[in-house]
Image (tube, rainbow, N blue to C red):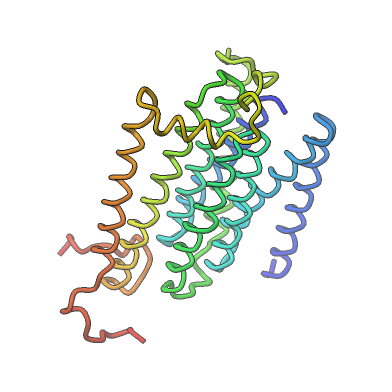
Amino acid sequence: MDQVMLQRAFYGALALLTLTALGIGLAMAGASGVAFGLFTAMTLGGALVCVWERSVVRSAFSLMATFTGVSGYFVLLEADFLAMAQILIYVGGILALLLFGVMLCPPDMEERQLKRVLPGLGIVGAAVAWLSMEVAGSARWYVDAGAPVGDALAEGEFSNARQIGVGFLGIDQYVVAFELAAIVLTVALVAAVYIARRSSVDLEPREGDA
Amino acid sequence: MPLGAYIAVSAALFAIGIVTIITRRNVLYILMGTEMILNAANINFVAFNRFGSNGLDGRMFAIFTIILAAAEAAVALAIVLNFYYLFNSVKPSEADLLRE
């Protein structure tokens, strides 16, 4: 099969998957189920496009759908602060960083090999499906898996950002982890700048540099 | 939707991330697969937090995961940059500096 046919088959299968997800969502939970199906299609569809596409740029951009879909799940799970942070950090930050990385990547259209990708998807997918069946059949969750507990929002509030802020700074809550995260971020960013810097010895053009 | 739906999506995203890491011969795809796996873990954290207790624990774990993912992406991209300067390639199989 040539590339065009393959591409058509893949995106046709993806559209079918989307419709199935939307249908299952509608059948299970009405309007919020449709939203769930849409986010599922975005998340898994974006990830599948990422592993399928030959061009790194397309893969990186398809991850945008994945990250946005995950932030949609956070909205459905009433974690609005996390949804916002997800979009800010993943779509705005990590994806931009990845695209910077893509810029220095020589286009290599032969790198993706279907004889690796398809068996990989098959084997890992089958293993996860089998394991899920086992777990679904035998697991006794500590939590009630049927319905969410209570209300995620405190009385009279419209967002749980305040709750999380108090959690970050409350002396008996997460303040130590919060400060540690600050140190980790500082160290990581300084280290990134130090590693990425070219030393003066390297500055002469080498073979292959533009 | 029940908890199982979120766990199923998370498992599928995790599996696709693993496949991305093991089948693509490019450092950037390894990073992308890692991000997918971290996102799958985050979905689980938040879902169990919502369906279990009404506390903050799961959401806090997810926030710290996002923070560490940001730090990881910055450092990893710096390493990829250096890798490319050294080897003129982004294929992980070509890192053989210690082999002599």
Res A141 quadrant in image: top right
Examine the rendering and report whether any part of residue A68 can be seen. yes
In the image, residue A189 above or below residue B49? below
- Residue nearest the observer in this picture, A110 or A83: A83
The x and y percentages for residue A74 are 61, 38
- Residue nearest the observer in this picture, A164 or A67: A164
In the image, residue B68 above or below residue A62? above
In the image, residue A21 above or below residue A45? above
Examine the rendering and report whether any part of residue A123 can be seen. no
Residue at (76%, 41%) from the top-left corner?
A: A35
In the image, residue B89 above or below residue A178? below
Res A106 quadrant in image: bottom left
The x and y percentages for residue B54 are 57, 20
- Residue nearest the observer in this picture, A109 or B88: B88
The x and y percentages for residue B78 are 32, 63
Residue at (54%, 39%) from the top-left corner?
A: B40
Direction from residue A138 to residue A33 in the image, left or right: right
Direction from residue B85 to residue A53 in the image, left or right: right
